[in-house]
Image (spheres, rainbow, N blue to C red):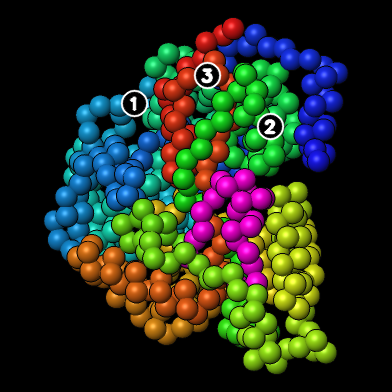
Amino acid sequence: MISKSLLLCFLLLTIMGCAETGRNSIAFGLNTSPVTLDPRFATDAISYRITRLIYKSLIDFDEQFQAVPGLADWEQLSLSHYRFTLKNKNREFHDGTYLTAKDVKATYEFVLNSKNISPYKGSMRMIEAIKMIDDNTIDFKLSQADPLFPGRLVIGILPEKLILSQHDFNKKPIGSGPLRFKDRKDESSLRLIRIKDNQVIEFVTLKDSTVRVLKLLRGEIDLVQGDLPPEIIAWLDEKKSVAIKKRRGDTFTYIGFNLEDTITGNRLVRKAVAHAIDRDAIIKYIKGGAARKAGTLLAAEHWAGRADLIGVKYDPQESRRLLVKAGFNEINKLKLSYKTTSKPDSLRLATIIQDQLKSVGIEMDIRSYDWGTFYGDIKEGRFQMYSLAWVGLKMPDIFRYAFHSQSIPPNGANRGRFVDAKVDSIIEIAELEPSIKKQADYYRELQKILFDALPYVPLWYEDNVLAIRKNVQGYVLNMDGNFDSLVDTTKVNN
């Protein structure tokens, strides 16, 4: 049976035919617009991926999520003293000025200033002083030892002069990255110019997946990454003009619980929910096989990951047993509310989970909202259950941000209000451990404790899926879904 989205796409193609536009840009179809083009405030996935192209940061990460040099090399002078030395190449800002240590200092001092309300301030809390040694050298002195500190310096560097003049980097970004800002006609259209060859890279926001596919087939956009229903991916795979590429990803999807709630605060209830979810069926039939089961936030490839944890086994019989143990039965049924966004894919997943929970005797009420209302409720703790995803996790400090008792919103992302003294203690010990090997051991131990406590039900890691026109070459999928290979993408006009 053909889906409504495929039927619509077929009808539109039949009526309108397929036509190239003759434009010279490489057009990238997005499902949502970047929230900001200012790297000091970019936390959503699209904003972060695009700002990486416009700005350069001091460090980057390799495939095992270890920090590697970006703009600068570094040395650790003591447990709480790091020195960064800027490299000689590629240090020119798009306005023609030269990037120096004063720009680095100004960027991070802005973030540390509480008046500016940067979301990165919390992860920089250990910085005690920033000292410019010369134009190429800058020191960071910390209030405590932090062996992972270089990995925190991921913010794109901005020109000091423009920071001081309160330049609006969101409206007119100026960095030193491989792409520079050209224009932004409205929220749905952003154009950048690739510096090495003046190739225009265009980001076009098209919220409806069917419209994105139609425009891809007509040649009005050149590539689409993610947020495509599996039946559309399978249908596109048969088209001569389009290629489908897939790669393992690390976007972690989960179900969260409110642990202050009298019902979802009961671990027996959370485990009953976990055993009732058939992840294999969802991954196969709904995700089109484009995901793998997860047991913890960090993927197995991460240097602190645990390949042995792949989540709670689907076991409806055990789910029913746990419900009885928790005091629920046919007369006294467990009733839960589940909050989600109004996006079609989110509602689809919610409906499937609702059906699976119903099969073991759990009644689940779905409540869908626009993103702003939904996210506001989650931060304020107005929920029993919800589903979200963590994108592009690289640093194990995510455990402090998401699970430490001091990270309950607005001080972090412990949205479920999880409080555990042992978890707090391990997080604090791990952060001060100078040996990366021992630190990894602490984080692996921590992940097993969280797996048993079940503040989240881990679901899966999303694969990265790309639909690209065959006359576009050089775009490579990365595990974290970044857009970095647009630097080398080329297009042959038909």
Q: Which kind of residue does numbered mark 3 sit on?
A: Val
Q: Which one is in front in this view, the residue at disc 1 or the one at disc 2?
A: 2
Measuring from the top left, give residue 334's x and y in whole percent. 75, 82
Q: Is residue 66 above or below residue 235?
A: below
Residue in view at x 67 percent, y 60 percent: 375
Q: Which kind of residue does numbered mark 1 sit on?
A: Glu
User: How many C-alpha atoms fall within 10 Å of the one at disc 1: few (<14), some, or many (≥20)?
Assistant: some
Q: Camera-side residue: 484 or 451? A: 451
User: Is 242 drawn above or below residue 272 in the view shown?
Assistant: above
Residue toward you, 286 or 211: 286
Labels 3 & 1 near each other (Cβ < 8 A): no
Mark 1 vs 2, N-terminal side: 1
Up the image or down, 36 lies above or below 488; here it is: below
Side (left or right) of 92 relative to 464: left
Give the SS element for disc 2.
helix
The residue at 36%/40% (across/down) is 57
- In the rendered image, which residue does mark 3 sit on? 472
The quarter of the rendered structure image containing the N terminus is top right
Write down the residue under mark 2.
235
Disc 3 crowd rating (10 Å Cα; few below 14, some 14-19, many 20+) is some
Q: Which residues are magenta?
A: 274-295
Which quadrant of the structure image shows residue 225? top right
| Residue 193 location (% of width, % of height) | 50, 20
> Which amino acid type is marked by label 2?
Trp
Q: Which mark is residue 92?
A: 1
Question: What's the distance in space between the residues labelled 2 and 3, CA to CA?
Answer: 19 Å
Mark 1–mark 2 distance (CA, rounded to whole Å): 45 Å
